[in-house]
Amino acid sequence: MSSLTRNHFDLFGLPAAFGLDRAALDAAYRSVQGAVHPDRHVAGSDTDRRIAMQLAAQANEAYRTLRDPALRAGYLCALRGVDVAVESNTAMPPDFLVQQMEWREQLDDAVAARDLSALGALRAALDDARRALLDALAVALDDRGDTQEAAGLVRRLMFLDRLAANIDAAEERLLHH
Amino acid sequence: MSPEPHQRRLAVGIDLGTTNSLVATVRHGVSEVIDDEAGRSLLPSIVHYREDGSVAVGYEAAEQAAADPENCIVSVKRFMGRGLDDARRHRTPYRFVEAPGMVRLATRAGERSPVEVSAEILKALRQRAEQALGGELVGAVITVPAYFDDAQRQATKDAARLAGLTVLRLLNEPTAAAVAYGLDNGVEGVYAIYDLGGGTFDISILRLTRGVFEVIATGGDTALGGDDFDRRIVEWALVETGLLAAAPEGGSSTQGGSSTQGGSSSQGGTSSQGGTSSQGGMPSALDRAIEGGLITAGDLRAMLVEARRAKEALTSHGHTTYAVQLSDATRVTLPLSTERFEQITRDLLERTLAATRRALRDAGLDVADVKGAVLVGGSTRMPQVRVALERLLGKPPLIDLDPDRVVALGAAVQANLLAGNRTADDDWLLLDVTPLSLGLETMGGIVERLVPRNATIPVARAQEFTTFRDGQTAMALHVVQGERELVADCRSLARFELRGIPPMAAGAARIRVTFQVDADGLLSVSARELSSGVEASIQVKPSYGLSDDEIATMLRSSIGAAADDMRARALRERQVDALRLVEATRAALAADAHLLSPSELHEIDALVARLDQARQGADADAISVAADALARGTEAFAARRMDRSIASALTGRKLDEVRL
């Protein structure tokens, strides 16, 4: 298979799994960039340089995708034929939707009260929930091979990551104003 | 493999600075700045259009800055890729002329764009280098502030081409500094590169790992630099002498400047529209001083020069005397202490620290993760900068390399590598990022972001859009750069249109827009309707950049060459390119012919032979046709070779084959 059509895992010579050796990913990324980066092909023909640029861009995209657990899991689901369809929340179980609303309310309350410690507590709760989700994803994707279930977990993970970003932004605003 | 010394390809690194510029090269394995004949390293970035029609650059030009301010262009870098409104935020003695895309300056030599003025500086550096090195340069790495946007980068590249330089790469200044610093010291870990130049401030957070320089985040302010500190001194001096009323206490420079009177000429204008003068512009007190006729443009220039001297004196002494004679014979003499200087510039320094904190946040890092700060730019000699950084990071900044030279030295190292003078221990790589988010205008003037800031380059991102009217056959695309949600708050880069979309119901067309940012940080955009295959693309430069034709025209008028010469030159360039392609392909075949089947090999051999024959003739078109055919015919071969080198890189094998 040509490098221009191979998937992100293949590009880095890594197994297509959710469990990932971060050090191996970092090393593979640097090795691949060392081979394909446009700086290494300045003297090549236009064709060489174009291919180098495409591959270097793909390596950057692959690295960005694989090092982020939510993106990596979503990408794995897509490779296995399931579209995570991040826009739709319809598949969310009711208990998770309730949990979502509670967290949102806690965030709003903490911001209104300018309560940094409440924000910190919410962030910690989210971190715990996130760790549990990552464990569940590893089981669903790598042990059971249940891609449908994994897609649901990815949607939850993306929600958590968005909320975490909102909390960080709120914290930033409180700290600097 | 290292070429023989006599085959060494001459390449330089150029630090095209706001205040000073430098050129450096690698000689005998060591990066060094090339001095002028008088032994001076710095070239003041000043261009003087003289009465006799000649152009002076550098020290000679600087001598005329006070006497002939309108024709003596100082700090032109501030206007690169900028429109009239941006240019007017800076109080300068110049007569700006509105022009499509980029502002122009009216001089006695005629209207000049900032690109042309910068090209004069680059030409002087190129001549200096060619004289010192005794030959023609194969190319140059030109540094730009990391925070430069697409228009500013494109303008810089155009200036280099106009100066007759082949641009091997545009390199971010902090990254260049990191290369010079990191390679010299063999450091590992996370470093902050704090670069306070004459007119721009950059902060970059880099991770150095076994020869890989990875920029994680970058930030800054293209309109904040050492010049602003000088202006604060001038403003202070005017207030102290009673020439100006004191600014309100807490005196940031943002009081609405629209109260100015009499400044209705085209060179006047007020620096603040809707209170935006804080964006690195001139303190409005100085606007009032000039517009109210308190001082002349020449006085301002003289006061700025003295401010600079005073600022530099304060780096080694606790106090100095600010002394300047104005054109009406008024003599200004004032004592200035370090404490007072720090006080009147505190908010400027605080802006750099805020940008530093934000870059760290973008990088997902804490100050404790930073192993050290590298200082770049002469303005980092101000003691308050060093003290503030030490307070922020908890450790003193690294100062073993001259902050004025470190950027040029790093650029020279990169230029040497890119020119093909690679040695066995040159196994390092730069991975840089794009400083600002790139996106498209969508309904309601909202920005849809395609490439976020701090994405590692090169980067390609695609997104699908659709039509919003039944039967819509064209789609206008507006490319913008910036971090804000609204198009109106971002910088407009280009507009183009995809036409010929087959009429469909609203929402049925699938238009895939691809943004690609190359290793120079330059953007190109293409759009394609997927069901019909209709395509449109744009190298994002029409609003600010120069077309190849414009460059050719400018070159022609500047060197006074006849059209015949231009044709001869074009033919020669094509012959040289063709020879390069022939040689590169032969080298590839010598190393990797085994990747081809006999028939494939035969076909490529024939294409090489055809180009080799064409390049020895005088038919430029025939050369192009043969070169295109060879390029197409070697595509699969090139891809296979690239795959092979990825495979060997991953298995950790060193490539002993000749590199292309």
Image (cartoon, coloured by chain):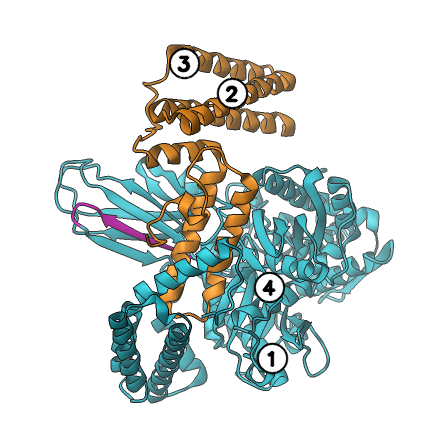
Q: CA distance from mark 1 to mark 2?
A: 61 Å
| Image: B336 above or below A17 | below
- Tell me the crowding category of disc 4: few under 14, some 14 to 19, or many 20 or more residues within 10 angstroms, Cα based: many
- Within the magenta stretch, is there residue B528? yes
Residue type at tag 4: Ser
| Image: B627 above or below B472 | below
Q: CA distance from mark 1 to mark 3?
A: 67 Å
Q: Colour of chain B?
A: cyan
Residue B555 x/y as whole percent: 42, 78
Q: Where on the picture, by quarter, is residue B335? A: bottom right
Residue at 59% across / 55% down in the picture?
Answer: B212
Which residue is labeled 1 in the image?
A: B129
Q: Upstream in the sequence, badge 1 or badge 4?
A: 4
Q: CA distance from mark 3 to mark 2?
A: 17 Å
Marks 1 and 4: CB-CB under 8 Å? no
Which residue is labeled 4 in the image?
A: B75
Residue B61 in view: yes
